[in-house]
Amino acid sequence: MFKVLRDVFARLNVNFFGPVFGVQFTKQNHTRPSTLKALEVFGNNPIRVIEIGCYTGINAKNILSILNVKEFVVIDPYEKYDEFPDYNISLLAKAEKIALKRLQSSNTKITWVKEYSNDAIPFLNDKYDFIYIDGNHEFDFAYQDMVNYYQLLSPGGVMGGHDISDSGVHKALFKFLKDYDIQNFGIKEPDWYIQKTSI
């Protein structure tokens, strides 16, 4: 019930309050468990970050404020995404504008890649220290993101994601852990996270 009410409020926030009044109600940012894990691992060391699924940029803003980010890659197709039943093209275009405004103070660190996560890979280079996955939660897509982006994770790096209670994400994670024999993982609602071995 809470999730339904939260989603309704989020849509009103983006569709109504932002466009009509030029301002959005914002919730207090709570740092997600994956970001706290990255903070534990990296401390104040400068790191490279990828976020898949930025939407209005609330989590990205939090990551940028908590971690010492030297490079941040945002991967989100926004209005190109026509297969997501919960959000229409107009809503996604508005979300992008809000994200751009919200993150403008960190613009020199951010690379925006408006592609599906699969198609974004050629735009990336080398390894990344913290990768956060919050894209399509259906099993096939979630699993594919875990597999594809694990290859881009630096040794000792942290990869995490949102909505572990979603059945697609949950199943994808446990298949991924088994297929890649990963022992070092954690689950703390609403996130999951792993740390890649440094060897």
Image (cartoon, rainbow, N blue to C red):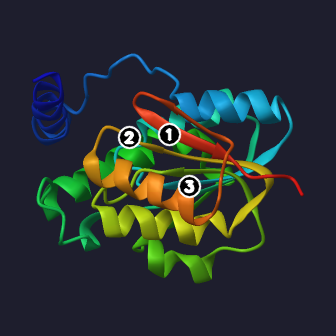
Dot 1 and dot 2 residues touching (CB under 8 Å): yes
Q: Nearer the viewer, residue 122 or 178?
A: 178
In the rendered structure, which amino acid carries the disc numbered 1?
Trp
First of labels 3, 1 by sequence position = 3
Quadrant containing the C terminus in the rendered view: bottom right
Q: Nearer the viewer, residue 88 or 19?
A: 88
Q: Disc 2 versus disc 3: distance between alpha carbons? A: 14 Å
Dot 2 and dot 3 residues touching (CB under 8 Å): no
Determine whether, in the image, residue 61 is placed left or right of residue 83.
right
Seen at 67% across and 46% down, the residue is 183
- The spot of residue 95 in percent (x, y) is 28, 49
In the rendered structure, which amino acid carries the disc numbered 2?
Ile
Q: Nearer the viewer, residue 165 or 174?
A: 174
Marker disc for residue 40: none
First of labels 2, 3 by sequence position = 2
The residue pinned by badge 2 equals: 164
The residue pinned by badge 1 equals: 192
The residue pinned by badge 3 equals: 177
Check disc 1 and report its element: helix, strand or loop.
strand
First of labels 1, 2 by sequence position = 2
Seen at 17% across and 53% down, the residue is 91
**146 lies above or below 41:** below
Q: Residues within 10 Å of mark 1 (few under 14, many from 20)?
A: many
Seen at 35% across and 43% down, the residue is 56
Q: Disc 1 versus disc 2: distance between alpha carbons? A: 6 Å
- In the picture as drawn, the residue positioned furthest to the top comes out as 28
Determine whether, in the image, residue 29 is placed left or right of residue 9.
right
Q: Residues within 10 Å of mark 3 (few under 14, many from 20)?
A: some
